[in-house]
Image (tube, grey):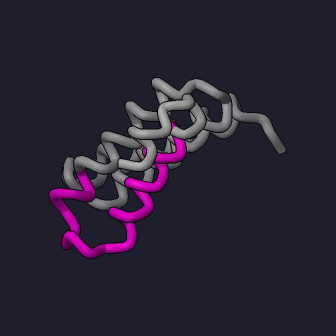
Amino acid sequence: MGDYSKAREFYEKAHKILEKALPPKHPSLATSYNNIGFVYSNMGDYSKALEFYEKALKIREKALPSNHPDLASSYNNIGEVYNNMGDYSKALE
C-alpha cells in the first residue's frame, strides 16, 4: 500500500518483542532487522537501510552456515541498496 511509516511502526513493535524474547544472535532478529531495512530502502533512506541490513548480516554470519540462503538474501539486499545509490562497484561486491 506504500504506507512505509506505518509498516516501519509495526516492524519496530515486532522487533521490540523479539528482542525481549530471543537471544541477541537469533536468526529471527536478523529477519526483523531485514524487514526494517526493506522499509527504509523503499523510502529511499539508503543509509538507514544499510544500517539495518548490515545488522541482519552480522547476525546471520554468526548464526547460520556459510551456504545458507538467508546469507545470500542479506548480500543481495545490501547490493541492491548500493545499486540504488549508484555505487555500482560496491553493489557488485
Q: Is residue 79 magenta?
A: yes
**In this orientation, does residue 72 appear?**
yes
Residue span colored magenta: 59-82
x and y percentages locating residue 68 in the rendered image: 30, 74
Task: Place residue 54 in its image quadrant.
Answer: top left
Closer to us: 42 or 8: 42
Instruction: Say which quarter of the image contains residue 5.
Output: top right
Percent across and percent down for residue 62 are 16, 58
User: Looking at the picture, does residue 24 appear above or below residue 39?
Assistant: below
Name the residue at 34% across, 51% down. 29
Q: Position of residue 72 (x, y in %)?
A: 38, 64
Question: Could you tell me residue 41's position as x and y percent?
Answer: 59, 36
Label tally? 0
> Foreground residue, 19 or 28?
28
Query: For the point 58% across and 24% down, which residue is it?
Result: 45
Residue at 39 percent of width and 39 percent of height: 90
21 vs 46, nearest the viewer: 46
Q: Kindly report the secondary structure that dominates the magenta region of the rendered protein.
A: helix
